[in-house]
């Protein structure tokens, strides 16, 4: 199977994806600080969520790098990752009492960034 090439502009996709990575890194730093300062705000559930989104923060730039080299399949993967993260974060943020309030806010922020990323991926695919 031959991978189709993509030649569209991914500038906005890159920016939004790196905003997500920065948000995840900020979350991990916040959890580390809260673990020492206010451990009730750094629950096991919050750490579990943070680790999972951190894995995606590693995978997303890898797929994005391939998309920047012209891989249409990698760009599709970026869109799929964004869609999954959007849905998962919305669902988790809506679970009553499962996460500290600040983490729910972070989940909503991640969902918003993923919605924006989906829009950027869709625009890039249309322009190709």
Image (tube, rainbow, N blue to C red):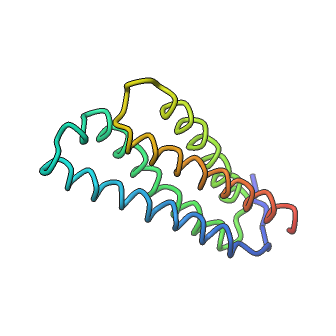
Q: Which quarter shows the C terminus? A: bottom right
* Residue 41 vertical placement versus 78 (above, below): above
Of residues 101 and 24, which is closer to you in this image? 101
Q: Is 10 on the left or on the right of 106, as rendered?
A: right
Residue at the extreme top: 96
Q: Position of residue 11 (x, y in %)?
A: 68, 76
Identify the image quadrant of residue 90. Answer: top right
Residue at image coords 70%, 64%: 71
Q: Is 11 on the left or on the right of 94, as rendered?
A: right
Q: Position of residue 9 (x, y in %)?
A: 76, 75
Q: Position of residue 58 (x, y in %)?
A: 43, 58
Residue at the extreme left: 36
Of residues 4 and 94, which is closer to you in this image? 94
Q: Position of residue 100 (x, y in %)?
A: 34, 36
Of residues 35 and 14, which is closer to you in this image? 35
Q: Is 82 on the left or on the right of 22, as rendered?
A: right
Identify the image quadrant of residue 57. Answer: bottom left
Residue at image coords 48%, 32%: 92
Residue at image coords 60%, 71%: 15
Residue at image coords 79%, 61%: 4
The number of discs equals: 0
């Amino acid at each position: 199977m031959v991978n189709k090439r993509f030649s569209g502009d991914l500038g906005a996709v890159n920016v939004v994806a790196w905003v997500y990575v920065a948000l995840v890194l900020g979350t991990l730093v916040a959890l580390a600080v809260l673990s020492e300062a206010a451990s009730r705000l750094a629950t096991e559930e919050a750490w579990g969520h943070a680790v999972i989104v951190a894995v995606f923060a590693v995978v997303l730039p890898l797929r994005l790098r391939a998309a920047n080299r012209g891989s249409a399949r990698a760009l599709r993967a970026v869109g799929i990752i964004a869609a999954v993260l959007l849905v998962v974060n919305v669902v988790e943020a809506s679970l009553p009492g499962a996460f500290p309030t600040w983490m729910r806010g972070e989940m909503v922020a991640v969902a918003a960034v993923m919605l924006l990323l989906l829009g950027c991926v869709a625009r890039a695919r249309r322009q190709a």
